[in-house]
Amino acid sequence: MQQPGRAAEIKAIGIGKSFGSFRALDDLTLDIGRGEFLTLLGPSGSGKTTFLMILAGFVQPTDGRLYSDGVDITERPAEQRAAGMVFQGYALFPHMSVEANIAFPLKVRKKPAAEIKRHVGEMIERVGLKGHEKKLPSQLSGGQQQRVALARALVFEPGVLLLDEPFSALDKGLRGQMQAEMKRLHQETGTTFVFVTHDQSEALALSSRVAIFNHGKLLQVGAPDEVYDRPDNRFVAEFLGEINMLPLKGVRPADNGSTGLCEDRAISMRCKAEKVRGDAILAIRPEYMSIAREAAAGENGIAATAVASTYLGAATRLDLTTRQGAKMTVSVPNEVAASALSQGNSVWLTWPAEKGFLLPDGGQ
Amino acid sequence: MRAYLSDRMGAALLMAPLLLFLVLAYAWPFLGVVKWSFTLPTPGLGQYNALLTDQLVQSVFIRTLRIAAIVTIVSVAAAYAITVVWVRGTPVQRVVAEFCILVPFWISVLTRAFGWVALLSNRGLINTWLQAVGFISEPLALVRNEFGVIVGMTHFLIPFAVFPLASSMRSLDDRVLLAARGLGSSRMRTFWSVFVPMTRSGIIGSALIVFVFSLGFFVTPAILGGGRSVMIAELIYLRIFQSPDWGLGAAISVVLVLFVGALMALLFRYIRPKQLV
């Protein structure tokens, strides 16, 4: 239906937005590649939705410029931007049938009736709404309304599709189904997708890149595994999932990586000690840690005491405390958890050198 | 279910005094009027027969429907514009609009009718000014005719038309309007093909209220029509207090009440009552 070449490439330079004295978005510079699936992730009030509204043209930025395919569109009104948009709650036209909703963007573009009919028919088929053409939005389920919203936003082949928390109203099963569907639509249309969510697992699962926001600032942009495994700061590390943090002393560069002391034991890391020297935080995702009776010399490990366990079905979550009081969490096979608890409680936590990363000590 | 039941009981209790008052002050006396229409001056359907043949009564009925229709269209259109400003305007616009909507409620219908006479009569403000400027040489006939009646009634009814419209505009989801613009629709197009259709129930409610009100108007047409543009309510008054032909007056009343009742039934069928306020 659409050549990937028609997808838009967007460049935001120094975008800022103030509402009175409140700074909703500050100095945001970001390139959105042609045909990419970019997720804007952050807690509510982080500025991600404000940025989406600026992209759509519903909100005028106070500073900065916005370019689409090299053309400055900062002042261009929403109706001339040709960005498809799916709103939270879908925002379908309640007085129009499914068919009429999807035909709307083509009608306002004054396309010939035959072409409108053909495109709408194709789109209805593509999102699986055949047989529902004449229904009103109020006669559809949440998932079906979602499909109408997607079809309506894609039918005019926009250069970019903007999605504002489109799945927040759906239950979990439907959510997974719609996510898969959206991924498929992205591949089929080749359009640039910009997706806003506060759900980190959704962001990691769907996107080619994730942009993490907090307090109006863009903190980090990168591929899902990049931001998950190598976050730049503590907020990103914690927002993307559970994380264990250990205070490190005397961090310095070493052969192929860096080294430091944790509770009097030498710890080695693959990552470079570029931004941090001396005191730092070592962060490790719980799933990369395992439990052992003891740590071999040269292996990364720390002694800890199991204090609680939570049975999760497929695995057991263990909460542990190190000698100096750092709280750790690991997810381990059920029988390992049982033996760890029965072993007089003292175990070793070990992890591969390449799975630990350094964060600046203290603050964000 | 229990909460729902007790809710309904509570609502019924709260409405009971009003209901009792309506029964005692309106329904009961009206039954007397119904009785007159079948018994005065002689028992039978004579008065209803007369309604079907009396040219004067029929022309008054037609005039009343015509005036009510025109007043409804003009009032709802004007009220729509005012309501858009009131509900969706800037804070200053909202205050000004609210003032314009509420002030008329503080002035009696009589005062307003005489105010229009002062403005519209042959030696009133408008004719005097137009003549002074040399725009016209003879005064325009602006009052003591249908035009004057329509002006006065429209002015009176616009604020009533505002409320159902305001409630439907307030309940409208802004994101739907944003969605329309984001999909490439101009402001004008968004207004006509999304905003207006979405306030349809408000328009229907508003039109029915104004229309029903107009049918029974008495003071405004009596003053601004100057006896030349008699509407139903005035005709009933004339039949009962001046002719006196109580039976015919009563029969006209009954027909009017039935007609209004049918319209109200339509109103409640197509829009839920809570959308009216």
Image: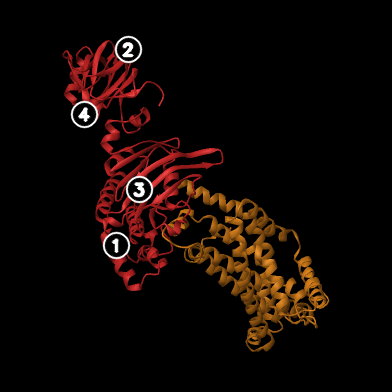
Q: Amino acid at mark 4?
A: Ala
**Residues behind callouts 2 and 1 on a single chain:** yes
From the image, tell me which residue sits under label 2: A324
Q: Determine which of the numbered discs, if any, sits on residue A123 in the image.
A: 1
Q: Residue at x 53, y 65 (%)?
A: B268
Q: B96 or B47, which lies in front?
A: B96
Q: Determine which of the numbered discs, if any, sits on residue A315 in the image.
A: 4
Q: Earlier in the sequence, mark 2 or mark 3?
A: 3
**Residues behind callouts 3 and 1 on a single chain:** yes
Q: Residue furthest front?
A: A70
From the image, tell me which residue sits under label 3: A194
Q: Residue at x 30, y 54 (%)?
A: A191
Depth check, mark 2 against mark 3: the one in front is 3
Report whether B40 appears left or right of A246. Answer: right
**Residues behind callouts 1 and 4 on a single chain:** yes
Question: Could you say where residue A326 lies in the image, as x and y percent from the top left?
Answer: 32, 17
Q: Earlier in the sequence, mark 2 or mark 1?
A: 1
Identify the chain of the residue marked 4, using the numbered disc in the image: A
Image height of A136 relative to B125, above or below: above
Q: Earlier in the sequence, mark 3 or mark 4?
A: 3
Depth check, mark 3 against mark 1: the one in front is 3
Q: Residues within 10 Å of mark 4 (few under 14, many from 20)?
A: some
Determine the CA span between mark 3 and mark 1: 20 Å
Q: Residues within 10 Å of mark 3 (few under 14, many from 20)?
A: many
Mark 4 residue element: loop
2 and 4 marks in contact (CB < 8 Å): no
Identify the chain of the residue marked 1, using the numbered disc in the image: A
Depth check, mark 1 against mark 4: the one in front is 1
